[in-house]
Image (cartoon, grey):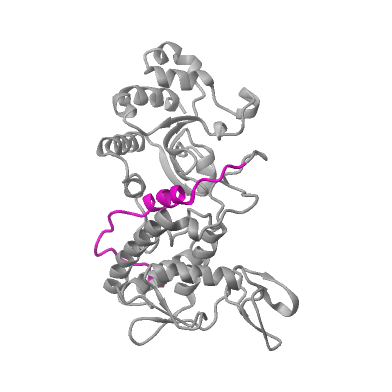
Amino acid sequence: MDAHHGEDIVLRPIGEVARFMKNLIPAEIPEGYALKPMFGGLAGGDEIRKGVVAFRDFLYRMMDLLITDGESYAKPPKSPKSISDYPFLHNLTNLLAEIGYYGKPADGGGLIINDIPSMPAAVGGKVSGGIASKTGNGGNRGKAGAVKSRITASGRLECMRFLSQCGIIFNEGGELKTAEYPENLSMLTGLRALSRADMELRGRRYWNDNYLLRCDFRRLMAEETDPLDALADILHPLPAGIRDFAAKLHKRYIGKGMDCVIINDNQHHFAYSFIKNSKRPLTPKDIYYLRIWEFSVSLRHGYCLVVRAKKTGGYAEEIKKFPEYMQKIIARGYGCDRKLRNERCQGGCQGFRIPLDDRVIAAAGDIETWLDYETAQA
């Protein structure tokens, strides 16, 4: 995650976290894409696609509220484990996903919610905020097969209060039995589809890599995701010139025989590796570990080009022609920040990190030269 080697964690303001999360939501969602068969039972294809767009718009509204008033809901923990460690965000994600996954369609377009793991349930005739439903998804089993709740009763009510401000109407009395979104009845269909993807298709959920809060519609698509399309999705907040530079770089090195693998953990990686000579099947993680360069997007570092250069000694004269800021970055070397410079860990072991700002457009030719040297005879 964002914590590194025991260093002191400086929590980012919730508004900054929410702005970053909002930028991960796709600005453009295509029409008419085919869906995986697993989503066919939820609703008709057109209804699901319409619902995904409606849910995307709901997410914009949700993030805007976090940006303007998030401090009223997202309280910082005493000892944060990462720069974005707000328990409220985890509770909100889990509750939304479970409402969508376990909720059943009701007449009028709402959802009926009978039994979800994060809800307090009756135990021995009493209501307990520490015990969830009989379902075991996502919890830790306690006595008699019970499942410890991931969200306390007070935490659940806080999330419901926030979601109510975003336009979701729950039943009266503070219990979670029904949910409606009268402003757009399609939204809950999108929530159901994306919740199924989030629950059934993902591996470990990182705070900024669940298919739900990113509205990752590509997880619903029957066809395999084109990495260039996914790259365009995630870079959409950047100026057109930078997006064009990134697309050109992608095409150039795919054309040279590199493979691009997408890895989402606490960062979003589009990593480029040569794997054609591999003698065994490679997992996405295997391909990532073989990367020579990548595009990386994270709250910690922003939008970057990261190069794991290992041949700089062979083209030192060429490096002298690079822009001064690139020369300085290369001159520092890369590796463990603590070992190289006795500095706190900043992810320096990942490679030389070049921000994707206006400077990369002017340096586009130099960056291609750099990557050409590093990928030659790889």
Q: Nearer the viewer, residue 14 or 372?
A: 14
Quadrant of the rendered image containing residue 171 = bottom left
- Percent of width and height locating residue 231: 35, 45
Furthest-top residue in this view: 317
In the image, is residue 109 part of the stretch drawn in magenta?
no
Q: Nearer the viewer, residue 216 or 94?
A: 94
Question: Does residue 102 appear to the left or right of 36 in the view shown?
Answer: right
User: Does the image show residue 282?
Assistant: no
In the image, is residue 24 part of the stretch drawn in magenta?
yes
User: Does the image show residue 251?
Assistant: yes
Q: Nearer the viewer, residue 34 or 4?
A: 4
Could you tell me which residue is drawn at 32 percent across and 24 percent down?
363
- Percent of width and height locating residue 52: 33, 66
Chief SS of the magenta region: loop
Quadrant of the rendered image containing residue 260 = top left
- Percent of width and height locating residue 308: 50, 30
- Percent of width and height locating residue 92: 50, 64
Q: Relative to 94, does residue 326 appear above or below in the rendering?
A: above
Could you tell me which residue is drawn at 35 percent across and 87 percent down?
107
Could you tell me which residue is drawn at 29 percent across and 53 percent down?
27
Query: In the rendered structure, which segment of residues is drawn in magenta?
Result: 9-38
- Disc tally is 0
Could you tell me which residue is drawn at 57 percent across and 53 percent down?
76
Q: Relative to 200, does residue 327 appear above or below in the rendering?
A: above
Q: Nearer the viewer, residue 323 or 82?
A: 82
